[in-house]
Image (cartoon, helix red, strand yellow):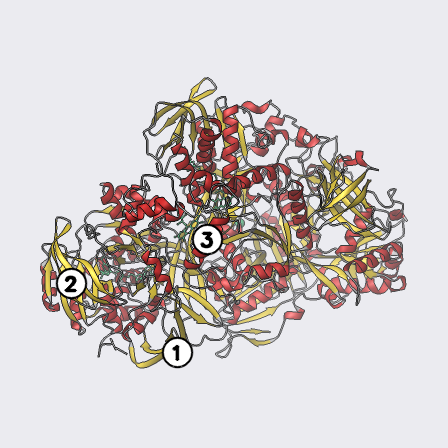
Amino acid sequence: MAERESPLVPVYRPGSHGNFAAGAGVRLLETRPGSIVQAAAWPGEERRLAAAIAAVTGLALPEGPGAGAADGRRAAFGFAPGRVLVVDQQDGLAAMLSGAIASDIGTVTDLSHGRTAIRISGDKAEWVLSKLFAIDFAPAAFPSGAGRATLHHDVSALIQRTGERQFDLYVFRSFARSFWTMLCHAAAEVGYEVA
Amino acid sequence: MLIACPYCGPRDVAEFTYQGDANRPRPDPASTDLDAWNDYVYQRANPAGPHREYWQHSGGCRSHLLVTRNTLTHEIAGVAFVRSAPVPATKPAPAAPRKRPASRKAKP
Amino acid sequence: MSGRRTETGGRIDRLRTIRFTFDGKAYTGHAGDTLASALLAAGVTLFGRSFKYHRPRGLVAAGVDEPNALVTVLRDGTREPNVPATQVEIFDGLVAESQNRFPSLSFDLGAVNGLGGRFFGAGFYYKTFMGPVIGPLKGTRVWMLCEWFIRRAAGLGRAGRAADPATYERVNAFCDVLVVGSGLAGLVAARAAALEGKRVILAEADATMGGSANWSGERIGGRPADEWAEDTTAELAAMDNVRLLPRTTVWGYYDGNTLAATERVSGHKAQAAKAEPRHRTWTIRAGTVVLATGALERPIVFPGNDRPGVMLAGAAERYANEFGVLPGRRIALFANNDGAYRAAAALAAAGAGIAAIVDVRPAISEGARMLAGMAGGELLLGHAVTGTQGGTALSGISVRRFDAGRPTGEARALPVDCLAVSGGWSPVIHLASQAGQKPVWSDERQAFLPPEPTQNWLGAGAFTGAAITAEALAQGRAAGLKAAGGKADRTKQPEVEAPTLDPAPAPVFEIAVPDGREKAFVDFQHDVTADDVRLARREGFVSVEHMKRYTTLGMATDQGKTSNVPGLAIMAAERGVPIPEVGTTRFRAPYASVSLGSIAAERHGDLRPARLTPMHDWHVEHGAVMQAAGLWFRPQIYGLPGETVEQAYVREARTVRAGAGIVDVSTLGKIAVQGPDAAAFLDRVYTNTFSTLPVGKARYGLMLREDGFVFDDGTTWRLGENDFLMTTTTANAARVMQHLEYFLDVVWPDLRVHLTSVTDEWAGAAVAGPDARKVLERAVTGTAVDDAALPFMGIVRGEVDGAPVMVCRLSFSGELAYEVYCGAGHGTHVWEALVEAGEPFGIVPYGLEALGTLRIEKGHVTGSEIDGRTTARDLHLDGLLSKKKPFIGSAMANREGLADPDRLSLVGVVSLDGRPLNGGAHVTLAQSGPGGLGESIGHLTAVCYSPALQKYVALALLRGGSALHGTRAFVSDPMRGRFGPVEIVSHHFFDPEGSRLHG
Amino acid sequence: MAEYSVFSLLRNGFNANRDWAPAWRKPEPKAAYDVVIVGGGGHGLATAYYLAREHGITNVAVVEKGWLGSGNIGRNTTIVRSNYLLPASIRFYEHSLKLWENLSHELNYNVMFSQRGVINLAHSPAQSDDFMRRGNALRHEGVDAEWWDRDRIARAVPGLDVSASARFPIVGGLMQRRGGTARHDAVAWGYARAADRRGVDIIENCEVTGFLRDGDRVTGVRTSRGDIAAKKVAVAVAGSTGRVMQAAGIDRMPIESHVLQAFVTESLKPTLDTVITFGGGHLYVSQSDKGSLVFGGDIDGYNSYAQRGNLPVVEDVMSEMVALFPGFARLRLLRSWGGIMDMSMDGSPIVTKGPLPGMYLNCGWCYGGFKATPASGWLFAWTIARDEPHPINAPFTLDRFARGLVIDEKGQGATPRLH
Ligand SMILES: Cc1cc2nc3c(=O)[nH]c(=O)nc-3n(C[C@H](O)[C@H](O)[C@H](O)COP(=O)(O)OP(=O)(O)OC[C@H]3O[C@@H](n4cnc5c(N)ncnc54)[C@H](O)[C@@H]3O)c2cc1C
Ligand SMILES: NC(=O)c1ccc[n+]([C@@H]2O[C@H](COP(=O)([O-])OP(=O)(O)OC[C@H]3O[C@@H](n4cnc5c(N)ncnc54)[C@H](O)[C@@H]3O)[C@@H](O)[C@H]2O)c1
Ligand SMILES: Cc1cc2nc3c(=O)[nH]c(=O)nc-3n(C[C@H](O)[C@H](O)[C@H](O)COP(=O)(O)O)c2cc1C
Ligand SMILES: [Zn+2]
């Protein structure tokens, strides 16, 4: 199997950057999951879709818009009516979901190559993301596990809160390098560490 | 301006794409009534006051929303998914009978 | 240095000395000083020159309302012009200079303008400079000559040309309660809301919280008001749910309770921290806003009121109390209200001599009388100031009795070096009024009070007209509590010790002196005088908005903060109508000027993101010249050393036709169309039919807009019964997606189809040329690629060097060609493998130019022909318009305007003189040349040197279209001076039978 | 009323400017006029002036709902040019430009039309070709157009980012030297004064609330100051077209009203001589005689009658401004405002007889009606006076949409926000 290449390679510089003298405010990491898959239900079939996702991933998706769950290895969250992004560090999720989601439930679309996954964590994660996105990152408004679809100018992003101070971002691959540069720029003020 | 997407919650207008007047019934696809098509494609009510209009949450969940917004104040009175509140597919219901432009038949 | 600094007092840090320069001269000040207070302390009285007459001007105010003392701050190799000195916090190394003067501030040649003042009244330029009505100088030439001088005389500071090296950023904030203004009203509002547990933001334009408490001299809760404010601020700072934003001006109140504020993060520091932005723009989405923006004092209009040394009473008080600076040694006050008395007492307490308090009112309150006693000096009730003396600094004033609205009796001269004026207060209702609602005039306060809320805000303090501290505090608490939705007040009303004053000013705005020689200024910066307002009325510009535009009153950098109300009061008096009938001009964002950089914020310097294909780095490493295509970057050519662009693309195109070439097509829009109704859906959106397409095959499709014009084209692949992969043109990808989503959501919600953008999922490489199949045979495993396994428009799946691929045999170049799609993360890997497999055949990578050349030779259309104005017929694509079914645009496609035989339609054009053709050149049937241009019949849409034909050829959209085939015509390109004979031919230049792509 | 000249200025200057008369009268509306023009914007006023001057029709009233010039004539970015793409547009706007060139003399009012040139920047070879096509179209219509390469632009426009590393590097530009700017308010006031001097009644604070009808025929207007009868009623209300036509019983029009914002910086010494437009996004900027940079970009993109917009466009416009002129980041935004644009379905105006008998309609100006003011008035006056269009405005009918004879400069189809 061929190695998958990241679009960030030329700009991904591990180490500390920006104003980190007093400790880096955030940590940035490209997580490179093996599978990023969209599962989408026909109207009325959302519960069966969630059940199928649970069967494949073991993640119990709460109901409601943007609801999600993550267990460190796998993650899933709703980002649009009937649509769920399901992520697995392993390859092969699309095929498994296709097997579980019959055509009367919905569709499965493999986006593993098409989205780049970036994790931002640390005390200043909310602050740095607030520079780019016009959504409320406070825990009360954006609880752990939940997902959001939003954008920074031309760049769409799906965001899941995967910890008290941790967010996973999924952006279009072709924009990823520009986005990464922008994210680093936003993080420089508080200092950042690229893992 | 904030639009309260029924899925995503209130979001900045920058996340949305305006899709215009929601009071334009699309003629039956097979219809060849050019007047009806002209009405649908080119004519707009353009009211000063409450306006029913489509917005797509293109920077979010990508749903099309039916928004009632006052064009004088920008106040938003209601937002719903278009899918759950579709407009009548074919029946035009203009408030007043439409006046045909007098120059319609004249050719320059 | 004359030294105006008091011995003690003020909130400055006297232990910290700060050095700076102004107009090249070195000065010192203290931490806590503004440039204005530090220069004033050093005895500087002359701060600037006015806009039109270049009159010498001093400080009028101590805050944002300053109209005169504008400076340019030089920093980071760039210039920041037009900053009020009152808004510049000094730091070590600050370099500032004065503006609008030549050669120097004290001796300014522009001051000659003042001599002609009587001819340069409001709007004089509309009446002259037109030049002669006939003869060679009619037209715009005379005006443009005069204008050259006018432009140089006008303007304030000079803009820098060097790029601004600073960074700016934006941040989004959400809160339950935003409090604007940190005076006492704002502070207690914030505290009341915070104690309810709400998320609170408190934004204050000044460097320190406290507003007028910092200089009021009042006592609250038994302590000096400024210390009480400090304590309250500290209390707020300690709360988790409160964010304090000093140096943050809230400047725009937008829809949905969205407010824009700009924080001055590091510009005031001698040294910014690493990666610290200069400014940061906050976009704040607030549940409720508490507007506690206070009030601004107004001057009184009288002759000579612009002499340096005449300033607002509150400003004089503030310089003394907050900065420890005396604006004069011998000071007179001039007022129509009680407020100035507190200033008088404060100035006296700080050590100034009070010469007199001149008050237009015949009687005053007890409190005021007591303060006058504390201040000392004469109390001249029923008097007015009618003139000033001095050059670039005030030396004295004239005072006369003031009776029944006019000065009477003899003038008395009072030698003073400062006159502190108070004409009443105007609440800062700007944010509240930005939505366009009309403010409400209060006769009692002689001021416009906030309008009815159009958004979710509450008001408190001087903003509402509350002039008394106890009232401001009570309002602040109530507003904070209400904004937080709280019930019982958890805070206590602190005790206030302040003189009891009468908040109502006398309705006196101007001291008109008949036949006065001296000008009486309303708008200082724009040199608008009371006579200008009268002239505007005389000429019929009586609407307040006309007055503004005719005189430019209120259009200066201070936006009339001090001048609007006096100006419209004078107009009201002239018209003999009450002030509210004149009304105010419209309030607009920003409340105070804000840097363009801070609003551009993070997009500064990097306007839009770059969109890169998976093979981008490979292209760059292999010598590609990259070219922008929308947000994408694509190879234009892969030039060899010494090659011109034409040589490179001709070589590339020729190699494709002779052997094989490879081109990156990853930018094509790709949309997954999935679901049981996918085929039916495609039948509706494409002009041709897709439901009949077998699985494993692709088809070229055409889309129209609803209005019947061509929208986009591309191939769509049927990967499964319910699973299609649609491709779109690069440029239209996003629009096609939206178009399809619209129809699914709005028009056909019953169709079960999902659309997903998979543009970024797939890397695509097109391998084209007679050897293309051989290249694939070497590279692709797991499937056969021969004609039987992979016929024209067939699709197979396989692998290239371990990476899964999909291969579709389709051709844009007219050659035997394949598009190889793989996961984007494998893009470079697969690309390299294909290039390697092609080496025996001399494969070359080719760019957009060669791609264009190959398609021109074939007569394929792209964006230059599908330009939104062409029909399928124009492009000879009408064969794709199904007659068996309706589709988007079908009904409108046959209207007379779209069927007109005179429309431009697609042809080929061949250069007959062997010279290159240019894109955008026109075509004429009659000879065209530099001497005379024939009538244009259309234009060339795409041009190239065709290696296949060995000629310069073009595609063109011409009136007459195919009927012109074989006609000799002329290319007419006056923009580039290129003329010459051409022949109009079919757009199928090369291999019209398509034999090669089946090869 | 006195001619304006240096001499009258001097004479009055010595006289403490006491003798200046109102620039136009403020008459009470009469019961009837030959022509009532609805809308005291540039186009309505110009129409009145040319009706009087070119056609001798002086029994004319212009009725304006607010103060004269309170609409878009008083809030535009003042760019005048005729460098359009399609022949019908070129002819229209060039007719206008020719009138502009002598307008101050004609009106005896300095409208400060300054031909400082308009440069449309191109940022890619494809865009250059588009501009070449346009330039050639202009040259074939006898209109001036030239191509300036990057170096020439760099010399003429210091401070402009001409570096190759710019996100949208400048490759050249289409220059129309005869283009430029004019003082927007002066155009309204100058036409008003000149029309008034020929006997036209200009009636401010008079809102048309309905139309007097005799069957289908329009016979006058109903206003906030009473009914006014008219042989002909001409509507030129720009952004208010939808509302006013509804009052005439025509409830749908090929128009959407959108808000366009504009901006000025604080005053500066001369720093930008020509008008510059950015082709990598949408921005146009010039410097006013007063010294402010006057600039704007896209419409907000939703129906509005509120004359104010929202932050996203503000941010976009500032970003483009700073991208184009990186030194301008330190300049300061002084004021922003909005105007309501009558966006038509093909981006081109409508200047026509009808749609009801006795009525004439002028609307659909989108971003570009200021420059059109003289020609719009001139051609509309012709159409009203002669009851038929002049050949120049003949293509700009209302029925062109139904018939597919659209004049679509941008090729965007019936999506007004994209024109
Ligand atoms: C921000 C902005 C920037 C622009 N920049 C440019 C530019 O650079 N170059 C350019 O060429 N064009 C520009 N335009 C467009 C141009 O300003 C307009 O197209 C043009 O001014 C419209 O014609 P007008 O002057 O007659 O309109 P307006 O001045 O709007 O006149 C219409 C008048 O009708 C009145 N009215 C409305 N309803 C009624 C009623 N019921 N009864 C009576 N009166 C009524 C209105 O009050 C208004 O005064 C710009 C527009 C805006 C908003
Ligand atoms: N006579 C009067 O009307 C009058 C005038 C001035 C002050 N006062 C006194 O002022 C006190 C009332 O205090 P207050 O809190 O209402 O006013 P204040 O003037 O003390 O405070 C207002 C604060 O708001 C800030 N501000 C204004 N606009 C802002 C903006 N857009 N963004 C950010 N900050 C902004 C100002 O910088 C100022 O610090 C009372 O003591 C009252 O007696 C009365
Ligand atoms: C070309 C032009 C230049 C302007 N220059 C200034 C200016 O220098 N100062 C200013 O305060 N406003 C300026 N304005 C804006 C006006 O003050 C006003 O905002 C605009 O005409 C819209 O009116 P409104 O804000 O009353 O709705 C200018 C407007 C235009 C059209
Ligand atoms: Zn949404």
Question: Which badge, 2 or 3, is on the more N-terminal residue?
Answer: 3
Nearest to viewer (mark 3 / mark 1): 3
Q: Which residue is mark 1?
A: C92
- Label 2 resides on the chain identified as C
- Disc 2 crowd rating (10 Å Cα; few below 14, some 14-19, many 20+) is many
The tally of labels here is 3
- Disc 1 crowd rating (10 Å Cα; few below 14, some 14-19, many 20+) is some
Position of D256 with respect to C819 (left or right) is left
- Label 3 resides on the chain identified as C
Of residue B21 and residue C444, the one placed in the foreground of this image is C444
Name the element at disc 2.
helix
Q: Amino acid at mark 1?
A: Asp
Of residue C313 and residue B29, the one placed in the foreground of this image is C313
Rendered view: D343 above or below C308: above
Position of B1 with respect to B84 (left or right) is left
Task: Judge: label 3 CB < 8 Å from ligand 3.
Answer: no
Rendered view: C279 above or below C25: above
Name the element at disc 3.
helix
Structural distance between the alpha carbons of marks 3 and 1: 41 Å
- Label 1 resides on the chain identified as C
Q: Amino acid at mark 3?
A: Glu
Q: Which residue is mark 3?
A: C147
- Percent position of residue C457, x then y: 34, 52
Q: Which residue is mark 2?
A: C341
